[in-house]
Image (cartoon, grey):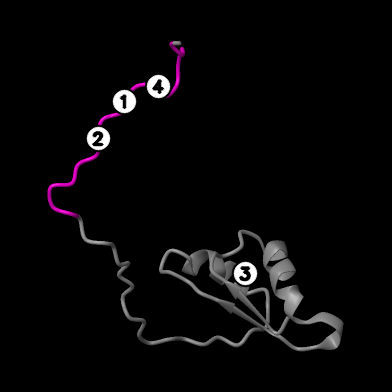
Amino acid sequence: MSHVFNFDIPKTVDEYTHRIGRTARIGKEGKAISLLSSHDHEAFRKIFGRFEMEKMKVDFVPKFIPLRAPRREGYRRSPPRGGGYGRRRY
């Protein structure tokens, strides 16, 4: 593989090594890209210090706002109609 993207930060140095090791097989070069939130910085700093890595800082990341479908007016969930769990009546 030429690239590995880490969307969640590994908990240990060994786990990180295992993940990024997939990029550099048989003497080839590869890139490991880790996406961090503000909550990940301290944990990743511990891992980062153990490796010789190029650090790339992104100055601005637009805020992510998930889209939701608009609620329908007057729509309500129906109450359950029996059945479900429990004893069956025949």
Residues marked 1 and 2 touching at CB (< 8 Å): yes
Q: Which residue is mark 2?
A: 78
Q: Amino acid at mark 1?
A: Arg
The reply, left or right, for residue 78 in relation to residue 53 is left
Q: Which residue is mark 4?
A: 83
Residue 87 to residue 34: above or below? above
Assign a secondary structure to mark 4: loop
Residue 41 lies, in percent from the top left, at 48, 69
Q: Amino acid at mark 4?
A: Gly
Q: Nearer the viewer, residue 17 or 6?
A: 6
Between tags 3 and 2, which lies in front? 2
Outermost right residue: 26
The reply, left or right, for residue 90 in relation to residue 55 is left
Q: Amino acid at mark 3?
A: Ile
Q: Which residue is mark 1?
A: 81
Between tags 4 and 3, which lies in front? 4
Q: Nearer the viewer, residue 18 or 71?
A: 71
Whether residue 49 appears in magenta in the rendering, the answer is: no
Residue 24 to residue 46: above or below? below
Residues marked 4 and 3 touching at CB (< 8 Å): no
The reply, left or right, for residue 25 in relation to residue 45 is right
